[in-house]
Amino acid sequence: YKDDQRVPFVERLLASVRALPGVESAGITTTVPMSGDHSDSVILAENYQMKPGESLVSPAEVTVSDGYFEAMKIQLVKGRLFNSSDTAASTRALIVDERVAEHFWPGQDPPGRRMYKPESAENVFKIGPDTKWLTVVGVVREVQYDGLATDRPAVGAYYHPFAQEPENSIGLTVRTSRGDA
């Protein structure tokens, strides 16, 4: 599907799947937990001051639709989950996991805070008129995206709403009330 066709396709797909008997929740994702198949991307918080010797963090960057967290039983800790108000025309939303939240805002409430992805490796901390701000709307429990046999240190994950970051490659997540649904 072309860029402008992805969101309508996913909306139709999810409406059809959610209408099936026994389906409690359904969503889509670009990354399935425990698959080890994910993108990592540097993200920074507004006004964050790195400590001497601290390295940039590159959490798993995941795009999901509304219904994904419910289907995967990923618990909301603070704020809200994505919903139909998170559209291409609305303020760019972001959900972070507990590890990312604790890294950037230890002991604080992240909802309402802003983050950004550096535009280039040369200008990691440069904020300009073209900086795309992402507003944290929620915090969820941490999920293991690498496999169990990884030696990589966990650095967390952050999530974009599909309607704002429509991707080509997606996976369908479905939770049913019965095993024979």
Image (cartoon, rainbow, N blue to C red):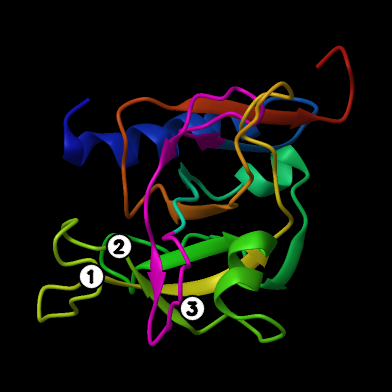
Labels 3 and 2: the sequence-earlier one: 3
Dot 3 crowding, Cα within 10 Å, few <14, some 14–19, many 20+? few
Identify the amino acid type marked 2.
Lys
* Residue to which mark 2 is pinned: 117
Residue 105: x and y in percent read: 60, 80
Identify the amino acid type marked 3.
Lys
Is residue 176 within the magenta segment?
no
Q: Nearer the viewer, mark 1 or mark 2?
A: 2
**Residue 178 higher or lower than 127, as above or below:** above
* Residue to which mark 1 is pinned: 132
* Cα distance between the residues tagged 3 and 2: 19 Å
Residue stretch rendered in magenta on the structure: 28-56
Q: Quadrant of residue 79?
A: bottom right
Residue sitting at the far right = 178
Q: Main secondary structure of the magenta part?
A: loop
Residue 117 shown left or right of residue 86 in the figure = left
Q: Nearer the viewer, mark 1 or mark 3?
A: 3
